Structure formats: structure tokens, C-alpha cells
Image (spheres, rainbow, N blue to C red):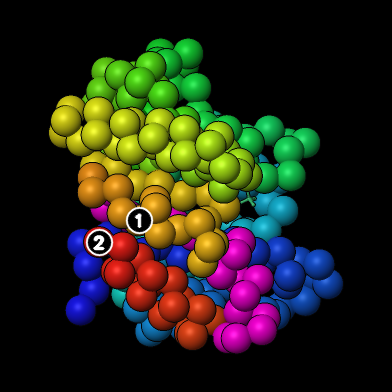
């Protein structure tokens, strides 16, 4: 039986492999359908401003063809807002973006950009899109999410995944405290970034978490074991932790 913790499979890096050769394959939509068959509860795709992996056409096909919820990760720009409003994904997760970064480094500074984010959160919410803010596990950012009336936050687990020993335990505590604070304020709590078979269990055991979004590791492992088996194994680890 699956637990109350949903697994969102991020298929960005299927598109990274496709784009490396400018070919039509491997197709991230095919990967999304396979992940759904293997037990993913949702699909996450990050349409970066530089289109380095997922493309506009991928988003159109995902929005059209998925039977499980689509979580569109997007920068807080007018262009991305327009795309979200056009395709109406189940959820939109607002993430920070820097063109020169290799991956999403740190969370969105919601506290520092309240005035910019407020109309965006309202417009997405009015369009029936569930807004999530991808933030650091920091009480200041949770308070900003409360002020913005964001229904969901996703806590960035990247630092936790990179640390070891006592420092990792301290970061895990920071994530658990942030999850408790957000849930106490009526916010649904998700987490993700950098999660693997080896580090997922302590995160999945945080009782307030309702969803984990995992991509890069799963797509990498799929090269060796196939996407279906690795999604099923991640699901099983998450379920055992609850
Ligand atoms: C916001 C986030 O954590 C995911 O989108 C993940 O970062 C995959 O995309 P990149 O590897 O391009 O950052
Ligand atoms: N929001 C996090 C996400 O979608 C997946 O991150 P990663 O597992 O690719 O690092």
C-alpha cells in the first residue's frame, strides 16, 4: 500500500539527454507516462528560461497527455506566468533561476520579493493552479509564504544532500522544523532536490511532508535499471519511511 507521501518524478534530464544530440529522443513525455505507470503520483518539469532541457513543446504535450498531475517549475517572470496560464498545469512551483548556474542553487528569496511575487501568486491561484514556492528551510521564507497566501511550499533539500555527518543532521533538523512551522500555518509541505536512494529515508520520515520531487538521480539510475524499477524502488523507500 502506498503511503500519504506522494512522489513527483522530475523528467527534466530525459530532455537533457535528448537535447545533447538535438534528436527527438529520448522523449520526456514517454518517460512521464512510464513513471506514472510505475507509481509516480505526479510529474514535475522545469521550463527554464534558457530552455536547456524541457521545451515549450514538452510542456504542451505534458499538459495534454498526462493522466496524473503536472507540476510546472518556473521562474517568476511574465513569460513563464503566461505559459502557466495558457497550459493550466495542476501546480506551478516558483523557483529562483540564474542563467549561469548548473542547477537550482538555493531557494527563492520570497521574503525579499514580496511585491513582485504577490500578483503572480494571486493570478495563478485565480486560474485554479496550485502555487508552490521553492524555498530554503528558513522561518523567514515560511513567513513570507504565509504573507503571500501560497498554499504550498517546497523545501530545498540540496544542502542536506551535499552535507555529511553532524552538519547533515543539523540541516535535516532545519528542514523538519521548517516543515512543522509551515504545516502549523496551514501550508502543504513538499521537499526536493538532490534526493537519492541513500539520503531519501530521513527526509521521507518527516511527518508533515506530503510530496517529494525527485529527478536527476532517478533518470541517472534508469540508465542501469530502467525507469519503472527505479521509480518503484524510490516509492518503496518512501513508503517504508512513513
Ligand atoms: C527546481 C529544481 O530543483 C529542479 O528543477 C531541478 O533543479 C532540475 O532542474 P535543473 O537540474 O535544471 O536545476
Ligand atoms: N524541485 C526538485 C526537483 O524537481 C527534482 O530535483 P532533482 O532530484 O533533479 O535534484
Position in image of residue 202 (x %, y %): 39, 53
Position in image of residue 115 (x %, y %): 40, 13
In the image, which residues are magenta?
209-226
Q: Residue at x 56, y 69 (%)?
A: 218
- Which residue occupies the foreground of this view, 55 or 82? 55
Q: Which residue is mark 1?
A: 204
User: Does the rendering let one see residue 195?
Assistant: yes
Q: Which residue is mark 2?
A: 242
- Which residue occupies the foreground of this view, 123 or 106? 106
Quadrant in the rendering for residue 53 = bottom right
Give the CA distance from mark 2 to mark 1. 7 Å
Q: Residue at x 33, y 31 (%)?
A: 178
Position in image of residue 236 (x %, y %): 36, 75
- In this picture, residue 217 sits left or right of residue 33: right
Q: Residue at x 67, y 81 (%)?
A: 223
Rendered view: 24 above or below 89: below
- For label 2, the SS is loop
Question: Magenta includes 210?
Answer: yes
Binning the other alpha carbons within 10 Å of mark 2 as few (below 14), some (14 to 19) or many (20 upward) gives some
> Could you tell me which quadrant the C terminus lies in?
bottom left
Amino acid at each position: 500500500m502506498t503511503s500519504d507521501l506522494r512522489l513527483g518524478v522530475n523528467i527534466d534530464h530525459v530532455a537533457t539527454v535528448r537535447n545533447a544530440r538535438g534528436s527527438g529522443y529520448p522523449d520526456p513525455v514517454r518517460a512521464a507516462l512510464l513513471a506514472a505507470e510505475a507509481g509516480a503520483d505526479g510529474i514535475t518539469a522545469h521550463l527554464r528560461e534558457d530552455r536547456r532541457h524541457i521545451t515549450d513543446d514538452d510542456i504542451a504535450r505534458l499538459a495534454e497527455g498526462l493522466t496524473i498531475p503536472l507540476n510546472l517549475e518556473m521562474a517568476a517572470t511574465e513569460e513563464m506566468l503566461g505559459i502557466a496560464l495558457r497550459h493550466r498545469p495542476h501546480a506551478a512551483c516558483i523557483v529562483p533561476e540564474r542563467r549561469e548556474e548548473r542547477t537550482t542553487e538555493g531557494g527563492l528569496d520570497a521574503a525579499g520579493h514580496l511585491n513582485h511575487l504577490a500578483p503572480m501568486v494571486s493570478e495563478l491561484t485565480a486560474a485554479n493552479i496550485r502555487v508552490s514556492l521553492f524555498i530554503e528551510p528558513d522561518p523567514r521564507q515560511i513567513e513570507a509564504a504565509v504573507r503571500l497566501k501560497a498554499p504550498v511550499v517546497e523545501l530545498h533539500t540540496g544542502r542536506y544532500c551535499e552535507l555529511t555527518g553532524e552538519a547533515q543532521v543539523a540541516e535535516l533538523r532545519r528542514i523538519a522544523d521548517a516543515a512543522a512551522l509551515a504545516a502549523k500555518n496551514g501550508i502543504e509541505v513538499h521537499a526536493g532536490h538532490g534526493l537519492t536512494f541513500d539520503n531519501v529515508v530521513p527526509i521521507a520520515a518527516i511527518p508533515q511532508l506530503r510530496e517529494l520531487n525527485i529527478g536527476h538521480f532517478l533518470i541517472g539510475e534508469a540508465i542501469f535499471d530502467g525507469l519503472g524499477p527505479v521509480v518503484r524502488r524510490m516509492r518503496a523507500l518512501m513508503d517504508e519511511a512513513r
